[in-house]
């Protein structure tokens, strides 16, 4: 007899059904090979970025010519001085909100005032961008390799983007908050998640005001979809934080905050060549191949992610259209392409394999044509030249004005002056009151022979100076640093500047002695 013949039937054991989560349409095999290779190449690109950034994070002089003003702003916060104030010969702020400078100042309280804490904030923010891109793609597609490849594709643009990821500037922190806000908005399920998304997007806005476009785009996508109520919570949270902080800074700065952050850039003319240059200078030469992978994702991308990526691209485009816009404005564009390319790799088997092959090819092309670690890390010889200039500036019998590099004179223990780029922003604006304030301040300093020396790195350093400058200062005939080869000292990113001409007050100082000390 068998147990199944007589008596009650044995109870049927119900085991939970488990199906491994595979990338949609990619069950394995040859179709996975391009994606796995792209992920491996992406890890190499991330490692190259990290090695380069770590090796130069402590360099005591400017890696990018605008870093000096970031250092000045952090120093002002630590000293309790206003970040936004009337423009003077001593200080003109960058036209950015305060969050990056506040975050850097918090770290500088521990590490001291130097470029190190500012660059650490950017370095860590860039790593956060890699993690967020990988997680966005991995959660959307179920494919971790596709996520790693997307993060690596963005990392591979590091050198093409002028190694901007880890500069002491606002851009990487702004992008990290933007991607974090996009992730939170995509996966929020409750009001507290919507509040978190609103807070993150507000943090992006308080780092760089162009994040307003992303907040508006994501809100629109939510309000016209099934999560309208959560979209409303996100919008209210963002508006409350952005509005209240703007009001607070406007009141405490006596009206200067909105002028710098909201009005000044709108007063400048457009760079018409950037209309096509966005494509021909930056996007197609850098990520033209990966754009094919991104296009494969368009039908599979949820509206929130699609609108967020579109907003990131618009932010970059708008930044380039502003006169003075540079490759840093392409960082959100490159991140958006990397995100879409990652989603493309999670598509149906053939499409995903094609997208993986395109991403792999793009990383390989960038690695062979743009990776230049040796040019991105200052040498010991360059540092010695900087030390020499710092000691020379400290040897004058009073304040020294270096308008293209206020960080250099801060390193010499001297009070900083306004950065030439920020001065130029005010001078080419249409606000006559602000321009008048600045020009009068410069004229008073010149007439009073306040500076023991004025070091000119570019003729534009003297923009805004009174026409009778030669009544009070004389240019020295000696060319500064004549014995230092071209390219042996200067910022890696931005304008290739170096001290060229020295102006001394009439009746004070000796040109020959100053040249001898520097030599």
Image (spheres, rainbow, N blue to C red):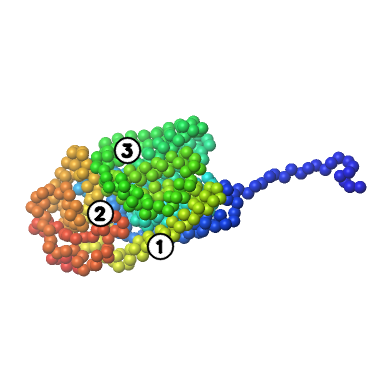
Residue 164: x %, y % from top left = 36, 54
Q: Residues within 10 Å of mark 2 (few under 14, many from 20)?
A: many
Residue 328: x %, y % from top left = 34, 50
Q: Secondary structure at mark 1?
A: helix
The circle on residue 249 is: 3
Residue lying at the far right in this picture: please name it: 1
Above or below for 189 versus 353:
above
Q: Is any part of residue 103 visible from this angle?
A: no
**Circle 1 sits on which residue?**
368
Residue 505: x %, y % from top left = 12, 56
Depth order, front residue of 444/269: 269
Disc tally is 3
Depth check, mark 1 against mark 2: the one in front is 1
Q: Residue at x 40, y 62 (%)?
A: 368
The circle on residue 429 is: none
Depth check, mark 3 against mark 1: the one in front is 1
Q: Quadrant of residue 12?
A: top right
Q: Residue at x 48, y 31 (%)?
A: 228
**Circle 2 sits on which residue?**
406
Depth order, front residue of 72/468: 468
Lower position in the chain sequence, tag 1 or tag 2: 1
Q: Is residue 320 left or right of residue 423?
A: right
Q: Residue at x 42, y 53 (%)?
A: 289
Lower position in the chain sequence, tag 3 or tag 2: 3
């Amino acid at each position: 007899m068998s147990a199944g013949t007589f008596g009650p039937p044995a109870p049927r054991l119900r085991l939970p059904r488990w199906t491994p989560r595979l990338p949609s349409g990619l069950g394995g095999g040859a179709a996975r090979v391009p994606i796995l290779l792209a992920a491996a190449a992406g890890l190499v690109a991330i490692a190259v970025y990290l090695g380069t950034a770590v090796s130069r994070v402590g360099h005591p002089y400017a890696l990018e010519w605008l870093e000096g003003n970031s250092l000045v702003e952090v120093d002002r916060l630590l000293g309790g001085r206003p970040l936004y104030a009337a423009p003077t010969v001593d200080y003109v702020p960058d036209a950015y909100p305060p969050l990056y400078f506040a975050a850097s100042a918090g770290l500088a309280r521990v590490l001291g005032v130097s470029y190190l804490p500012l660059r650490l904030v950017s370095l860590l923010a860039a790593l956060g961008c890699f993690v967020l891109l990988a997680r966005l793609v991995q959660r959307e597609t179920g494919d971790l390799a596709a996520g790693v490849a997307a993060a690596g594709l963005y990392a591979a643009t590091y050198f093409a983007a002028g190694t901007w990821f880890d500069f002491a500037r606002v851009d990487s922190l702004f992008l990290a908050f933007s991607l974090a806000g996009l992730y939170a908005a995509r996966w929020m399920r409750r009001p507290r998640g919507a509040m978190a998304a609103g807070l993150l997007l507000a943090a992006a806005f308080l780092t760089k005001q162009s994040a307003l476009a992303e907040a508006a785009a994501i809100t629109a996508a939510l309000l016209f979809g099934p999560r309208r109520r959560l979209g409303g919570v996100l919008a209210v949270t963002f508006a409350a934080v952005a509005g209240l902080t703007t009001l607070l800074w406007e009141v405490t700065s006596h009206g200067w905050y909105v002028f710098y952050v909201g009005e000044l850039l709108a007063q400048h003319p457009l760079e018409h060549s950037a209309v096509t240059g966005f494509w021909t200078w930056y996007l197609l030469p850098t990520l033209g191949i990966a754009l094919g992978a991104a296009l494969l994702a368009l039908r599979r991308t949820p509206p929130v992610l699609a609108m967020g990526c579109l907003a990131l691209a618009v932010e970059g485009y708008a930044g380039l259209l502003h006169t003075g816009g540079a490759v840093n404005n392409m960082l959100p564009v490159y991140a958006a392409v990397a995100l879409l390319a990652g989603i493309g790799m999670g598509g149906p088997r053939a499409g995903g394999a094609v997208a993986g092959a395109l991403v792999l090819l793009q990383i390989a092309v960038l690695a062979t044509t743009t990776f230049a670690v040796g040019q991105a890390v200052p040498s010991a010889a360059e540092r010695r030249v900087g030390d020499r200039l710092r000691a020379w500036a400290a040897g004058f019998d009073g304040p020294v004005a270096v308008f293209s590099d206020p960080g250099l004179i801060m390193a010499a223990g001297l009070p900083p002056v306004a950065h030439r780029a920020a001065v130029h922003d005010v001078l080419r604006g249409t606000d006559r009151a602000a321009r008048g304030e600045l020009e009068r301040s410069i004229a008073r300093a010149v007439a009073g022979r306040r500076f023991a020396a004025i070091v000119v790195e570019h003729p534009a350093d003297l923009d805004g100076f009174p026409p009778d400058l030669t009544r009070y200062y004389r240019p020295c005939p000696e060319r500064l640093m004549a014995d230092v080869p071209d390219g042996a000292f200067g910022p890696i990113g931005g304008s290739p500047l170096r001290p060229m001409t020295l102006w001394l007050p009439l009746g004070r100082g000796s040109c020959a002695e100053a040249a001898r000390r520097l030599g």
